[in-house]
Image (cartoon, rainbow, N blue to C red):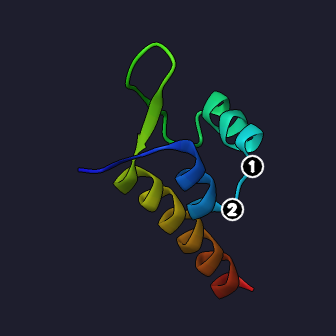
Amino acid sequence: MKLIRLPKVMDYTGLARSTIYKYIAEGTFPRPVSLGSRASAWVESEVQEWILTRIEERDAQSETV
């Protein structure tokens, strides 16, 4: 298991910091793991799974069109 910090999450997803935290608040993005009082990181596999789910949703939509 690998933990990644916010800049890497932003790089993987192409999302801005504010959008990532908005999606977390909505419950549609993986929550970070607290590493201390001022540090957090995400489980890399959870972020990758979130990306794969977006791709699957896209492909499912294109099949129904």
> From what the image shows, is residue 6 above or below residue 64?
above
* Label 2 Cα crowd, 10 Å radius (few <14 / some 14-19 / many 20+): few
Q: Position of residue 34 (x, y in %)?
A: 41, 23
* Label 1 Cα crowd, 10 Å radius (few <14 / some 14-19 / many 20+): some
Residue at screen point 59% across, 42% down:
28
Does 49 sit left or right of 14 as displayed?
A: left
Residue at screen point 37% across, 25% down:
35
Quarter of the rendering containing residue 65: bottom right
Q: Tell me the amino acid under the disc marked 2.
A: Gly
Does 7 sit left or right of 65 as displayed?
A: left
Q: Position of residue 26 (x, y in %)?
A: 66, 32
Closer to us: 22 or 18: 18
Disc 2 on helix, strand or loop?
Answer: loop
Residue at screen point 46% across, 13% down:
37
> From what the image shows, is residue 14 above or below residue 10?
below
Dot 2 corresponds to which residue? 14
Q: Tell me the amino acid under the disc marked 1.
A: Ala
> From what the image shows, is residue 56 above or below residue 45?
below
Are the residues flagged by discs 2 and 1 in contact, CB closer than 8 Å?
no
Dot 1 corresponds to which residue? 16
Which mark is on residue 47? Answer: none
Tally of numbered tags: 2
Residue at screen point 38% across, 53% down:
44
Q: Position of residue 15 (x, y in %)?
A: 71, 54
Mark 2 and mark 1: span between their CA atoms? 7 Å
Does 22 sit left or right of 34 as displayed?
A: right
Disc 1 on helix, strand or loop?
Answer: loop
Q: Position of residue 50 (x, y in %)?
A: 50, 56
Closer to us: 11 or 60: 11
Quarter of the rendering containing residue 42: top left
Residue closest to the far left: 1
